[in-house]
Amino acid sequence: MTIEGLDEIDRKILVLLKDHARMSYSDLGNAVGISRISVKKRMEDMEKAGVIQGYRAIVDTTMVAEGMKFFIDLEVSPENYEDILEKLAGSDMIRQIYGVSGDCRIHAMGFAPNQTQLRFFANNFFRTMKGCRRIEWHTVVTTYMDKDGGVAFVRYQEPEHLEGQSPENGSSAGE
């Protein structure tokens, strides 16, 4: 997708910001070969045009003990599709909503304070939302990679004090 009015320097700035949103105007300018003032002006223009919609910290919620990330999949009746989208969008727990392939299916990502509240939310939604044919939810246990969130895949390494132990009893494989 090409956005009209952006030149090569703008695109380079966007690539850098995607991975380093806290980069200073000076550092961005040095990286793309223009002054910090020019970078600031370009970024303000891209903000006004809606190309840059904000700057945020991406927190891997699987690393935070106070809650859990979840995915919820819904199969809904066509006549209630918009109502269900509106209800999901109004929930404080839901962060992203997608229309996906299939017969009137919705996929959403959210964040719940705990398993009990997630279960209550999903069960209550299914029971009270007219036209919700099927609901399925999954909690995220580990984030291995999230390019947009800045999480890179790293191969799991067994901690040194556990190497060679069997998972069942903690004994060494050679004992």
Image: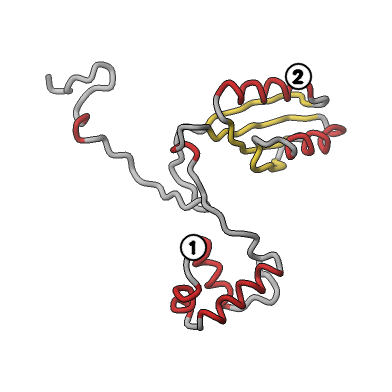
Q: Quadrant of the N terminus?
A: bottom right
Residue 35 in the image: above or below residue 28: below
Q: Which quadrant holds the C terminus?
A: top left
Most foreground residue, 139 or 134: 139
Total count of labels = 2
Q: State left or right for residue 89 relative to residue 67.
A: right
Q: Residue at x 40, y 47 (%)?
A: 153
Name which quarter of the figure residue 99 lies in: top right
Residue 82 placement, left or right of 46: right
Q: Quadrant of residue 38?
A: bottom right
Q: Marks 1 and 2, how far apart in space?
A: 44 Å
Residue 64 in picture, x, y percent from top left: 46, 37
Q: Most extreme residue toward the top, as rendered?
A: 169
Residue 34 placed where, x, y %? Answer: 50, 83
Q: Amino acid at mark 2?
A: Arg
Give how far across and how far down residue 10 sits, in percent: 58, 75
At horizontal 67% and vertical 24% (from top left) the residue drawn is 122
User: Is 162 placed above or below 56 here?
Assistant: above
Say what amino acid the circle numbered 1 marks.
Arg
Residue assigned mark 1:
22
- The residue that mark 2 highlights is 127
- Is the Cβ of the residue at disc 1 closer than 8 Å to that at disc 2? no
Q: Is residue 6 above or below residue 54?
A: below
Name the residue nearer the viewer: 85 or 111. 111
Task: Looking at the image, tell me whether mark 1 or mark 2 is earlier in sequence order.
Answer: 1
x then y, percent, for residue 139: 54, 30
Residue at the image point whose x is 70% and y is 40% from the top = 101
Q: Could you say which disc has been placed on residue 96 in the image? A: none
Residue 10 falls left or right of residue 23: right
